[in-house]
Image (cartoon, rainbow, N blue to C red):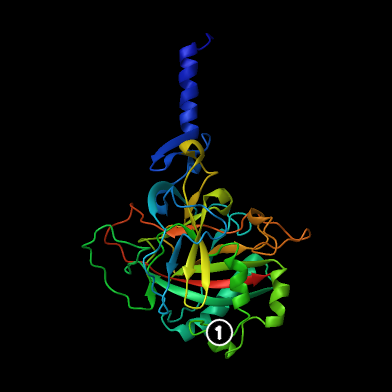
Amino acid sequence: KSKPSRCSRFKGMMRSMALMAAGVLTAGGVYLLFSSRKKKSEHVKFVMGKFNYEAQHVPASLLSSGLVYVDRTTTGADEAPVGEVQRTVSVPVRNARGLDLSIDSNGVKLVPHVIQHVDYEDVDAVVRKYYPECCRLVKEYTGAAEVLAFDHNLRGSAVQSWMNKSENEKEQKPALGTKYQSPAAIVHGDYSVTSAPLRLRMLSEPPKVNDTWGSVTKGNPLIEPQEVEKRLKRRYMFINVWRNIADEPVEDMPLGVVDATTVPNSDLVTFEVRYVDRTGENYLAKYDPPGGIADDRYHKWLYFPRMTKHEAMLLKTWDSAGVQFEGFEGEGHTGNKDMAKPPSTFCLHSAFKDETVSADCPKRRSIEVRLVAFF
């Protein structure tokens, strides 16, 4: 047989490379999507999502700079944020159904959770009946010795706020009432290296007016005050149980999650939430891939399309043993040479608009329960 010409060999090489990688031009640069050229059935499926990151001039910080914050009133409503300037970035969001994800490695996992549903608008029913279901679920999938539920939020995509603005200002969305908050359509993590241990300490204090668990403990702390310092020296994990509470699958404003191992600390922005009696902290994020080119190693976005009310997403919001914050012992990291060191510490997440669904699809209604697990 005659050898193929240099030109034909070059063309063949280029076809192979095209099968192995597809580049998507995004607002943040170029995102490379890699897939196998041997098994077409394994090709990646994704949608493009628009996410609200922080503008490049917003100062990155792991500890508070005092420059980026929001004042929250006693009713839970927010004033306009200060120092927080958003930048919308379009990135691929992978269909994570069928992917081999774990809470330790990636920080997120979708699990079946068939239960007897409660009236989720009834706070007492949620606290007394649904919280225990969530505790059992988290204990099963994390192997924790003890799990405590301490808070929850109802969210509806019909509710608007500075974190969920309609692209059409004239659009009139039906009201859900004050029991529902808007989806958080801003890239964020629920805690910081400072606020995670602070939140744990707060659970050793008598419940405040808005602490839902107070009715169960009859006014006593959720954690014995003399125990909290011991628990801070052990591995503890904050985790959310997120579920759809509508009869229809989630299509409008689903929750996107970043694989926890794909975000460098240099992208994080400390965001203060200033209450009347305390100051909490979250992490916001910037999107700045090296050289303007991103792939699965940088901000790998995932979602679980059409989640039903018979499923639950387990979302890690802080792991005191995670390797990402080694060196912060005595704050949000538990330093112990004999302790497991999971790759993930927390997941950035955000609601996003899936452009592939119908504009008149049912509005999302969801609940997230916040829990802490001890190992």
Nearer the observer, 360 or 178: 178
Q: In which quarter of the image is residue 171?
A: bottom left
Nearer the observer, 231 or 352: 231
Q: In which quarter of the image is residue 63?
A: bottom right
Q: Can you give x and y, in whole percent of width and height, for residue 299 in the image?
A: 51, 48
Label tally: 1
SS for tag 1?
loop
The residue positioned 39% from the left and 54% from the top of the image is 86
Question: In the orientation shown, which residue stands out farthest toward the bottom?
Answer: 218
The residue positioned 44% from the left and 63% from the top of the image is 307
Drawn side of residue 50 relative to residue 170, left or right:
right
Question: In the orientation shown, which residue stands out farthest toward the left?
Answer: 170
Q: In this view, does 247 lie above or below 121?
A: above
**Quadrant in the picture for the C terminus:** bottom right
Q: Is residue 246 above or below residue 110?
A: below
Nearer the observer, 304 or 60: 60
Question: In the orientation shown, which residue stands out farthest toward the front?
Answer: 66
Q: In this view, does 138 lie above or below 179?
A: above
- List the residue tagged with mark 1: 207
Query: Does the rendering let one see residue 38?
Result: yes
